[in-house]
Amino acid sequence: MPYDKALIAGKLRRWEKYLESYRLPMWDEIPDFGLYMEQVISLLKDYLDYMPPELKEAQFITGAAINNYVRKRIMPEPIKKKYYRVHIAYLIMICSLKQSISIPTLQTMLPVEMSEEELKETYNAYARRHHQVATYFNEQIRIAAGAILDHDDDHTSLTAHDTEDLIRFSAILAGFSRLLAEKLLLLNGKTLENGGSIEIEDHHARKTPEAEKPKE
């Protein structure tokens, strides 16, 4: 059954409008008076409410998942079963980043040994970048979905022909973005001496059978 263009366009416009005003809380806006697990879960659901409801799991974040992050030292331990600003900042970044990066990889990106001042700086930079990328994402979707949204002036070679093509565009972009992030994280602490070659290989030439190479 084909996609209903009017339905898809309406969904895209509503999500675009929501993302325009969506913000993660800044460091000083996160409560720091000690919350119990149930309160933390409720708070995280409010903070990370940018996912369309129909795509959310029944339990977006669970106590078991938080306990697992603590056990694996992906975030600090609670203090007498209470979670403070430092814990919630880690959880906001973990829960939003795990949509595109594996949990083991996150340990490289968000070391648990950060001081509170380092974490504050890291978190605020993340929250600002999160909004900037959301704005950039909206701009790219406006271009990619130009034919669906009837933005005739925005049509480029990146414009999807229909909803199926927009799905392909989004899935491929997500794949490349994840690969780039994880590839760069693997270079943490590396140098030219121990991080591998930076030369660009001609893969086509390397894979061309001898019989198919042009004769001199």
Image: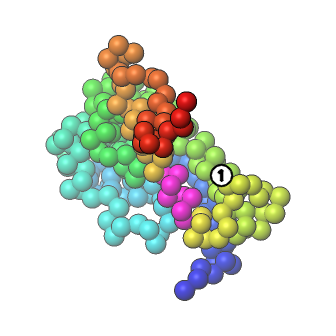
Above or below: residue 116 compared with residue 37: above
- For the N terminus, give its image quadrant: bottom right
The local secondary structure at tag 1 comes to helix
Q: Quadrant of residue 108?
A: top left
Residue 110 shows in the view: yes
Residue, x 49% and y 58% (percent of image)? 171
Above or below: residue 13 compared with residue 61: below
Looking at the picture, how far across and down is residue 198, in whole percent? 45, 23
**Is residue 79 shown in magenta?**
no
- The span picked out in magenta is 167-174
Viewer-proximal residue among 162 and 64 = 162
Looking at the picture, how far across and down is residue 110, in whole percent? 34, 33
Q: Please, which colouring scheme is shown? A: rainbow
Looking at the picture, how far across and down is residue 93, in whole percent? 40, 43
Residue, x 58% and y 83% (percent of image)? 2
Q: Quadrant of residue 104?
A: top left
Viewer-proximal residue among 108 and 73 = 108
Viewer-proximal residue among 82 and 101 = 101
Residue, x 78% and y 56% (percent of image)? 154
Q: Residues within 10 Å of mark 1 (few under 14, many from 20)?
A: some
Identity of the amino acid at label 1? Gln
